[in-house]
Image: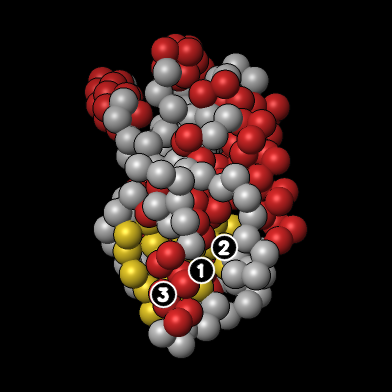
Amino acid sequence: MGKPDYKVERGLLREGAGHIAGVDEVGRGPLAGPVAVAAVILNPKDLPRGVDDSKALSATQRETLFETILSKALSVAIAFASAEEIDALNIRGATLAAMARAVNALSVRPAFALIDGCDQPPGLCCGARAIVKGDASCLSIAAASIVAKVARDRMMTRLDALYPDYGFARHVGYGTKVHLDALARCGPTPFHRLSFAPLRKARAVSLVIGHDAATAG
């Protein structure tokens, strides 16, 4: 598959649609930190070069393209779903809610949104289409994937400064051995997703132990 292009957006523009937003999320799988969602309306007259699925780029490339996208795009919005929201709604529900917040927060009102994945978030201010693996085929979604990835990585680096024992800057919240060892040693932070295994199992065990101790007392 080649790099993402602007064909889908141009087709919508030819049909008379106004501004087109690309939407993507980063961070569904980690044990800690938020899901980050970006919505990006590219300028069809000044498209950024070198944009690709964020997973296909190095950290340095993403940082450079992040600044390029912000400088060239007609509008960019970022929304986060916190660990608390993820635990309350489940990961799918929290991600879709953050997608709607990002699209609705754009300073330029979109006429249509192209969403990476197979779900269309409820509550959007415009029409939408879900595109499976859209970050690899659709330029606006790929741009959103870069913005979301850089925004989330920067947040995890800040969390690393607050909680240096966990190595957040290295694994950005994923369940690596370093992260799991830190959890076993230090327990969860307020930014951990308690509904995710193995945190869910550890929490259940601690509740049982606490209950048994209270009963024995």
Do labels 1 and 2 touch, CB within 8 Å?
Answer: yes
SS for callout 2: strand
Query: Which residue position holds label 1?
Result: 21
SS for callout 3: helix
Camera-side residue of 208 and 120: 120
Camera-side residue of 150 and 80: 150
Image location (x, y in percent) of residue 187: 47, 22
From what the image shows, is residue 213 above or below residue 8? above
Q: Earlier in the sequence, mark 3 or mark 1?
A: 3
- The alpha-carbon separation of the residues under discs 1 and 2 comes to 5 Å
Q: Earlier in the sequence, mark 1 or mark 2?
A: 1
Q: Who's the residue at 58% across and 30% down the image?
A: 58
- The alpha-carbon separation of the residues under discs 3 and 1 comes to 14 Å
Q: Who's the residue at 66% across and 47% down the image?
A: 66
Tell me the crowding category of disc 1: few under 14, some 14 to 19, or many 20 or more residues within 10 angstroms, Cα based: many
Inspect this view and state whether residue 43 appears: yes
From what the image shows, is residue 65 above or below residue 194? below
**Horizontal side of residue 152 vs 133, given as left or right:** right
**Amino acid found under the numbered disc labelled 3:** Gly
In which quadrant is the C terminus drawn? top left
Q: Earlier in the sequence, mark 3 or mark 2?
A: 3
Query: Which residue position holds label 3?
Result: 11
From what the image shows, is residue 119 above or below residue 90? below
